[in-house]
Image: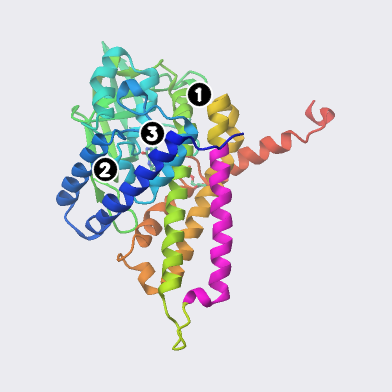
Amino acid sequence: MDFQVSEKMTTILEMVNGFIDAEVIPLEGEMLHGDPEELAEKVAAAQVKVRQMELWAPNHPVEFGGMGLSMVDHGMLTEALGRTPLGHTVFGCQAPDAGNIEILHRYATPAQRDRFLRPLVAGEIRSCFSMTEPGMPGSNPVMMATTAVKDGDDYVINGQKWFTSSADGANFAIVMAVTDPDAPAYQRASMILVPTDTPGFNLVRNVSVRGHPGTGHASHGEVIYESCRVPQSNLLGLEGGGFVIAQERLGPGRIHHCMRWIGIASRAFDLMCERAIGRQIDPSGDTLADRQVIQHWVAELDAEIRGARLQTLHAAWVIDQHGAKAARDEISAIKFSVANTMLHAVDKAIQVHGALGVTDDTILSHWYRHERAARIYDGADEVHKTSLGRRILRGYQTPAAES
Ligand SMILES: Cc1cc2nc3c(=O)[nH]c(=O)nc-3n(C[C@H](O)[C@H](O)[C@H](O)COP(=O)(O)OP(=O)(O)OC[C@H]3O[C@@H](n4cnc5c(N)ncnc54)[C@H](O)[C@@H]3O)c2cc1C
């Protein structure tokens, strides 16, 4: 294992961190209190500068205008971008587009590449990923009610999805639907590209999350597919291959999430320390930083965040060396442990800020509101713990017990 940061990456990380501090964090006030249209203009202006610096879409292959970074390098970059909720958007690698780009890059036909992939990487359009259904357990997606039935040269899709993140304003959805109900469980479903202007694609609402329905990219759509007809040439990959593709999307995607969460934890930690140093709590001049309980929180969180970072970089390194399948245990472990580290950091930072922590005068309450979901999406804590625990225990079975 070698986490030596190359000279090139050191330079890139300095540039990115400097840009995030100078140009992106100052936009957070606009995001929390301002006009969404003005924010969009400022984000677009920042994106132009990112392209000029040749840092656009860092995780994508070079032939698509990206930087073609390894998983470890992209992980470090993602931490830097994750220090603000706007970081990934400004650099052209935000979810769900980033994951969709990965699978399109791998499975799209030449025609699908031209129509969907190239403009997506260029940031000209947005996309969404439509798999979870309100009436079915997302934790066990083989239970899926949405169907895509062949009719002539088309698929006709019917079903109800929700938490199709960023559907509002997206140009197309990658929809998971049952194409063969009689096939073995993991071969029943397929992924199909559905332009959102197709008749029968109905964005019913942006689901309100903790008091905020959101708009545009920052929203979670409920979508009803009603006799939604697309050509069979919009099938992505093989028919019945939906779960294989989903698995490939989720593995590296979890590294991206975890490193973004470490970015959040680091920034929350910085805000916490700055507040502790600056907040006088006694006429003698004592600040919060003079209290032992705060010193312990700082030390404990520092250790937790360092551990989470190394654990995630290690998982990224295993993917770089041996592929996502070989990193199954590492990915399961970071998915639940890093999510909880990040939430712990945000919670502690809010506590140190007192009443200020729950206001929208800092970014902390935004994260408290939205990032609770980290323990649910891309595999709930309990699901990852069960599968990791089971695999670990299997290694302790005696040959007699195995037979
Ligand atoms: C902010 C956010 C964004 C999302 N974005 C998208 C998106 O873009 N596209 C998309 O398709 N979906 C998206 N999702 C949906 C997400 O993938 C699902 O919420 C997730 O898969 C869990 O499914 P569920 O909500 O149906 O919960 P359920 O499957 O009903 O599970 C509920 C709870 O039961 C427990 N549980 C479940 N299974 C087990 C088990 N085997 N053992 C023990 N306990 C268990 C867990 O605590 C779990 O949280 C998003 C969700 C959120 C919150």
Left or right, 27 with reference to 246: left
User: Gap in Å between the C-alphas at discs 1 and 3?
Assistant: 14 Å
Res 317 → quadrant: top right
Q: Main secondary structure of the magenta part?
A: helix
Residue lying farthest right? 400
Label 2 environment density (alpha carbons within 10 Å; few <14, some 14–19, many ≥20)? some
Q: Return the residue found at the far top.
A: 152
Left or right: residue 136 versus residue 397 is left
The residue tagged 1 is 186
Could you tell me if residue 365 is visible in this image? yes
Magenta run includes residue 224: no
Report the Cα–Cα distance between label 1 and label 2: 30 Å
- Can you tell which quarter of the image residue 116 is in? top left
Question: For the magenta stretch, what is the residue range?
Answer: 288-314
Q: Which mark is residue 131?
A: 3
How packed mark 1 is, by other alpha carbons closer than 10 Å (few <14, some 14-19, many 20 or more), is: some
